Amino acid sequence: AMMSFALLVGASVAEAQFHGMEAHAICVNDLQQESVCAGGGLTCLARLTNIDEFGDFLRMDALAVDITEPDGDTYHYGNVLAGGGPATVLPGEIHDAFYWLTAPATPGTLRITTTFTGHDLFNGGIWPDPNPWEGAFSAAYNFAIRIEDCAGGSSASGPRRTRLRTMR
């Protein structure tokens, strides 16, 4: 199941409005399952939705991915946004970022942390922004993928470590 979180950047009690965004992340195999055979491929989606009630634009500056393999080795992939970003997300709009993983040949648990960083432009939907002040956000999202031994005990083929591809 796709999990999500919302980030409350700031709110005025008198107006009861919300500054911020909602983010989701998920990786699935070709059968849309949240598991993969050792050495198999996963399609991953990171989604940022602008739910700011003040009409502010959001700027997603980077999407970083950290992967911890079953043996404990951790790999950091810097900005995986297509074209390197940034991406402006207008009020009510969604920005999807896709990346692809090839799981290592070792069965176990693949732990993934997706970190969204950017700015709430606090511009009330006005462009160019008359207000030079921006509110930075950084939100990490953690989830796990099960790597299964689909080779029935024989040695699985696949990379020795997780590989990540983007649409650059």
Image (spheres, rainbow, N blue to C red):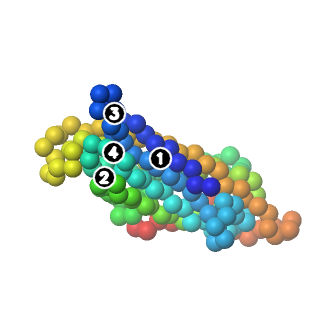
Residue at 66% over, 60% down:
34
Q: CA distance from mark 3 to mark 4?
A: 12 Å
| 3D distance between C-alphas at marks 4 and 2 | 6 Å
Location of residue 13 by image quarter: top left
Q: State the SS at label 2.
A: loop
Q: Nearer the viewer, mark 1 or mark 3?
A: 3
SS at badge 1: strand
Q: Residue at x 68, y 46 (%)?
A: 72
Density class for disc 2 (Cα within 10 Å; few <14, some 14-19, many ≥20) is: many
Distance between the alpha carbons at the discs numbered 1 and 4: 19 Å
Which image quarter holds the N terminus? bottom right
Q: Dot 1: within a 10 Å radius of its alpha carbon, few (fewer than 14), some, or many (20 or more) residues?
A: many
Who comes first in sequence, dot 4 or dot 2?
Answer: 4
Provide the residue designation for mark 3.
16
**Residue 84 falls in which quadrant of the image?**
bottom left
Toward the viewer: 125 or 75?
125
Mark toward the start of the polypeptide (1 vs 3): 3
Q: Label for residue 115?
A: 1
Q: Is residue 161 above or below residue 125?
A: below
* Residue 104 falls in image quadrant: bottom right
- Disc 3 vs disc 4: Cβ atoms closer than 8 Å? no
Foreground disc of the pair 3, 4: 3
Amino acid bearing label 2? Pro
Residue 10 located left or right of residue 29: left
**Badge 4 density bin: few <14, some 14–19, many ≥20, Cα 10 Å:** many
| Residue linked to disc 2 | 91
Whether label 3 touches label 2, CB < 8 Å: no
Q: Which residue does the numbered mark 4 point to in the structure image?
A: 52
Amino acid type, label 1: Thr
What amino acid type should be assigned to the residue bearing mark 4? Asp
Measure the alpha-carbon separation of dots 3 and 2. Answer: 17 Å
